[in-house]
Image (tube, grey):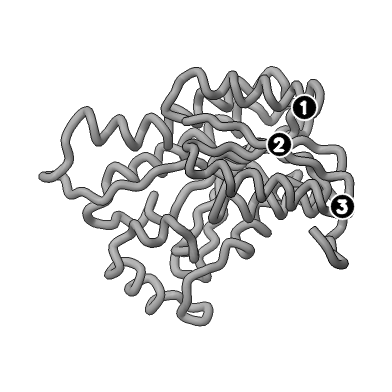
Amino acid sequence: MTGEVDLPAQTLEGKVAIVTGSSRGLGAEMAMDLARRGAKVVITHTSPSSESKAAQLVSDINGLPNSSQAISVRADMRDTSSPKVIVDATLKAFGSEIHILVNNAGVALSKSLSEMTLPEDYDSVYEVNVRGVILLTQAVLPHLPACSRIINISSVGARAGFAGVSLYTSSKAALEGLTRSWAGELGGNGTTVNAVAPGPVKSDMLDTIDPKIVKMQMENTPVQKRVGTSEEIANVVSWLAGPESAWVSGQVLCASGGWMMY
């Protein structure tokens, strides 16, 4: 990375963060924003096709003019051994503590109730969006110091009830339930657990959503009648990861330009 870089306040200096599904799109922006604020970041990706993007992101982060560093780990969250692989790589690279976990990896599926096949379609969504989140959070738990941050990436679909995507939206509703329960379990030492529910965001996943749904959301978004940007969502995640959000836990922050209000 060349040229002068304007960095925000280094509120996450000395922190270690894991961001799953972060070789591209929204996850990559989250990882970069945490690094720009000083965090050391572990980027996870699933397939060989993502290898070059993950490597470029690591290079970009390592080139920042602050104390941030990054590594990448190939790990498919459908594989129950992946959480240990991710945690072991993190501890080897950055020491004994993990301060921030962003459960971002997820898959979407557009099938109506009559079209879906069980258990295949159910497993393809829930193994990543729910089981993978539980297993990774369990693996990270022994290494979380006081005042750590767990941030789960949900979706406005968790509460909106979109037709044709019930497996995806129900998996995100489950994630929000986990968020509230874990906030109650883990808050004793100052650790917070929250979720971010983006509306439509310019990203690879947006292309997998029914265009009619996206158009409807844009038309009904109070703020500028548009979809969001990855940078706007990453800013919310970084705020939750930082010290300023210490009194916020068990919440779902809806970042949708006002399309969904709760």
Q: Are the two marked residues, 3 and 2, in contact with CB atoms closer than 8 angstroms?
A: no
Residue 137: percent from the left, percent from the top? 58, 27
Q: Residues within 10 Å of mark 3 (few under 14, many from 20)?
A: some
Residue 172: percent from the left, percent from the top? 41, 43
Residue position marked by numbered label 3 in the rendering: 10
Residue 93 is tagged as 1
Q: Decide which of tag 1 and tag 3 comes sooner along the chain.
A: 3
Q: Decide which of tag 3 and tag 2 comes sooner along the chain.
A: 3
From the viewer's perspective, tell me whether residue 145 is left or right of residue 48: right
Quadrant where the N terminus sits is bottom right
Residue position marked by numbered label 2 in the rendering: 71
Q: What amino acid type is highlighted by mark number 1?
A: Ala
Q: Going 76% across and 35% down the picture, which residue do you hit?
A: 16
Q: What amino acid type is highlighted by mark number 2?
A: Ile
- Front label number (1 vs 3): 1
Q: Is residue 251 visible?
A: no
Q: Is residue 13 visible?
A: yes
Q: Are the two marked residues, 1 and 2, in contact with CB atoms closer than 8 angstroms?
A: yes
Q: Mark 3 falls on what kind of element?
A: loop
